[in-house]
Amino acid sequence: MTEHVAIFDTTLRDGEQSPGASMTRFEKLRVARALTRLRVDVIEAGFPAASPDDARAVHEVAEQLASERGDQGADQPIVCALARAARTDIECAAAALVPAVRPRIHVFLATSPIHREYKLKMSRTEVVSRTRDAVTLARSLCDEVEFSPEDAGRTEVDFLHEVLEAALEAGASVLNIPDTVGYTVPEEFGAMIAGVRAQVRGIERATISVHCHDDLGLAVANTLAGLSAGARQAEVTVNGIGERAGNAALEAVVMAIRSRSERFGLETGVRTEELVPTSQVVSEVTGMLVPPCQAVVGLNAFSHEAGIHQHGVLANAATYEIMRPETVGAATRLVLGKHSGRHALRLRLNDLGFAPCAEELDRAFTSFKVLADRKKTIADDDLKTLMQAAEAS
């Protein structure tokens, strides 16, 4: 029996904080529509206190979803707004969320020693008190409150548990454990989540969430470790965009859960065939190109140039593709280049209307290899010229 993992998308908030990726409220509306088609569980629409435009964007995203789904709130993504543990932030978030059918206020406060000393200039006692007061206020304004102890990955374990218990007592129903600076490794992060489950009093009343950054390239691995340890919400972004090196990539987390269901025993409600279209929307809106080798959504994710690989894929796609490309909205590409073999060349020639005999294919293949040493990719016009020459020989 599989358990559900809620997908909390923060592309419109944490993703937008990636340098150069800021979005207007109209662009946020476009991305929100794509995320709704993708069927994420939560859309963190922004940080209302950050700017008047961001507050309007959150309000308009909430309004749009409410109008498009009518009164069928159960099918609505939750619309979430971020707030620091300060009255003005929390009240601003609550005002922006007024149109939402299913609103959530997400309150955060740093807890690690380095943040307490250099950023907050607060004692442990003051952090606990501020947490309790902020969550209490948020809960008075919204039925659903999430709390995040920022930089949990570098926070003393006993103090982390103390802050989480204060948030629970004040009314938080989601406790998010962020590896804010991408500091932890999977075994460590998984143990942290297991410790929260085992030692935080009242944890059974809350959903444990994970939010991992990619500074060491471990965001997806840490997220999966947290889910394996009992977290049931994953905070992710499309294409993995976000502060510094980015966040855990939504598409990679979702497809790892789906492709290795026997390993994780988990499922999401994401409509996976919308992954590539959603990736393209986010790339267009932010201007941040998706690297060709990006997992799941990159151009090369289902592309094959090496002859051995092409032969295997033509015989049985599962030889080199662990997921079917159509399940994510992509297609297999056999790219012709200097590493390609006869099988792929013959297939492409057939697609172009040629039916070479063995001798013609041999001549075309010899010419193809010579040309491929000079060009990175062979175009269809090149193949037509090669084949016409082979037929004339």
Image: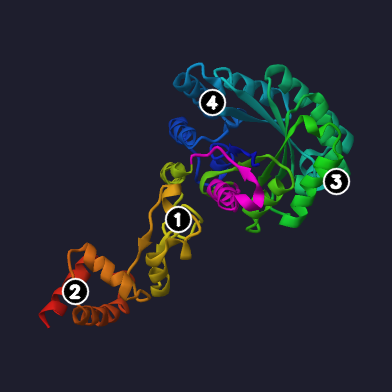
Q: Residue furthest front?
A: 1
Residue 336 figure quarter: bottom left
Residue 109 locus on image (x, y percent): 75, 36
Of the pair 266 and 167, the residue shown nearer to us: 266
Residue 366 figure quarter: bottom left
Disc nearer the start of the sequence (4/1)? 4
Please tell me whether mark 2 sits on a helix, a strand or a loop. Answer: loop
- Residue highlighted by disc 4: 76
Disc nearer the start of the sequence (4/2)? 4
Please tell me whether mark 1 sits on a helix, a strand or a loop. Answer: loop
State which mark lies toward you, 4 or 2.
2
What kind of residue is marked 1? Answer: Gly
Q: Residue at x 13, y 77 (%)?
A: 391
Mark 1 vs 2: CB contact within 8 A:
no
Please tell me whether mark 4 sits on a helix, a strand or a loop. Answer: loop
Please tell me whether mark 3 sits on a helix, a strand or a loop. Answer: helix
What kind of residue is marked 2? Answer: Pro
The range drawn in magenta is 243-271
Disc nearer the start of the sequence (1/3)? 3
In the image, taking residue 247 as reference, residue 272 lies left or right, namely: left
- Residue highlighted by disc 1: 298
What kind of residue is marked 3? Answer: Val
Quadrant of the drawing holding the N terminus:
top right
- Residue highlighted by disc 2: 356
- Separation of marks 4 and 2 at Cα, in angstroms: 56 Å
Residue 206 locus on image (x, y percent): 75, 31
- Separation of marks 4 and 1 at Cα, in angstroms: 29 Å
Is residue 360 one of those drawn in magenta? no
